[in-house]
């Protein structure tokens, strides 16, 4: 499947999950808007890897916890790219800014999660909608299990924010369906613990926090077209695999390459529950 002449923005694509998504899209020929917050060197390295794959891109900086900076990000993308076909909302603050259990979490740490996931997705989807045409894709990275079970206690800020973002996904799915734009959230399992958590004195033992059944350490998402529920607004899950680095390796081309997701349900005024 070719994505040549398509343009994609992935927030938080200088490294980690975002970089993996960017590289997969680049392999399919898409031009990539690489977003970063602080690590410009990592963003430049992502651009280098994209070009090695025969694609091209550009680097953009913004703090996704600041609404005015998200608006500026899209303004800059409009000035550089003739269109936008794929928007992946992936970025979040570093875990040390929000990874505390309910009894210890501060309002500032809650704000870091909600500003990036709820306000950030609201503004990002709204601005992306101004550039997307029929066949456009908006994809939000969530963690459905962590939002619902309560087992991962230090995830309370991000889990609550992700749950609110998942609700926004449904609203945008309905709002954009008649324009042929699909909006979905995808939910991977846990990947790996962050060494910065240990340096902050936090418990990084996955088994401590996953007793509630919210995933297994070392797993990451593998898109599988056969398992994907194509209804707009659904939170989709796939079976997981562990790659050799223990990091999340994704192939969003299997999702964004679909010529028609079943938006017709929304056009008829019907929407099913999330899977």
Image (tube, grey):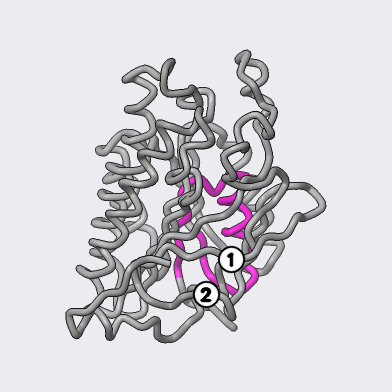
Can residue 82 be seen here? The reply is: no
* Residue named by callout 1: 238
Q: Does label 2 or label 1 sit earlier along the sequence?
A: 2
Decide: marks 2, 1 in contact (CB < 8 A)? yes
Local crowd at mark 1 within 10 Å, few (<14), some, or many (≥20)?
some
- The quadrant of the rendering that contains the N terminus is bottom right
- Vertical placement of residue 272 versus 148, above or below: below
Q: Position of residue 64 (x, y in %)?
A: 37, 39
Q: Which residues are magenta?
A: 7-32
Along the horizontal axis of the image, is 236 left or right of 272?
Answer: right
- Badge 1 marks a residue whose secondary structure is loop
Locate the C terminus and report the quarter of the image it occupies.
bottom left
Q: Which residue is rendered at x = 28% and y = 85% of the image?
A: 264
Q: How many marks?
A: 2
The local secondary structure at tag 2 comes to loop
Q: Residue 125 at what x, y percent from top left?
A: 29, 57
Which residue matches tag 2?
Answer: 228
The residue positioned 57% from the left and 81% from the top of the image is: 2
């Amino acid at each position: 499947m070719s994505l040549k002449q398509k343009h994609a923005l992935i927030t938080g694509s200088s490294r980690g999950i975002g970089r993996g998504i960017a590289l997969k899209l680049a392999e399919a020929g898409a031009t990539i808007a690489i977003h970063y917050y602080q690590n410009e060197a990592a963003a430049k390295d992502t651009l280098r890897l994209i070009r090695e794959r025969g694609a091209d891109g550009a680097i953009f900086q913004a703090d996704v916890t600041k609404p005015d900076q998200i608006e500026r990000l899209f303004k800059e993308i409009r000035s550089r790219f003739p269109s936008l076909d794929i928007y992946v909302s992936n970025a979040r603050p570093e875990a040390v800014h929000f990874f505390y259990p309910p009894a210890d979490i501060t309002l500032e740490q809650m704000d870091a999660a909600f500003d990036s996931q709820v306000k950030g997705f609201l503004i990002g989807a709204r601005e992306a909608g101004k550039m997307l045409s029929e066949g456009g894709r908006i994809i939000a990275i969530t963690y459905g299990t962590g939002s619902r079970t309560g087992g991962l206690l230090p995830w309370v800020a991000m889990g609550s924010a992700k749950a609110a973002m998942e609700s926004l996904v449904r609203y945008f799915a309905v709002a954009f369906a008649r324009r042929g734009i699909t909006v979905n959230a995808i939910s991977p399992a846990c990947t790996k613990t962050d060494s910065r958590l240990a340096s902050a004195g936090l418990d990084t033992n996955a088994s401590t926090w996953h007793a509630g059944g919210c995933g297994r350490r070392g797993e990451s998402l593998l898109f599988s077209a056969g398992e994907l529920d194509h209804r707009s607004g659904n939170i989709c899950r796939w079976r997981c695999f562990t790659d050799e680095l223990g990091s999340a390796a994704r192939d969003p081309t299997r999702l964004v390459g679909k010529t028609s997701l079943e938006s017709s349900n929304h056009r008829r005024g019907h929407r099913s529950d999330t899977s």
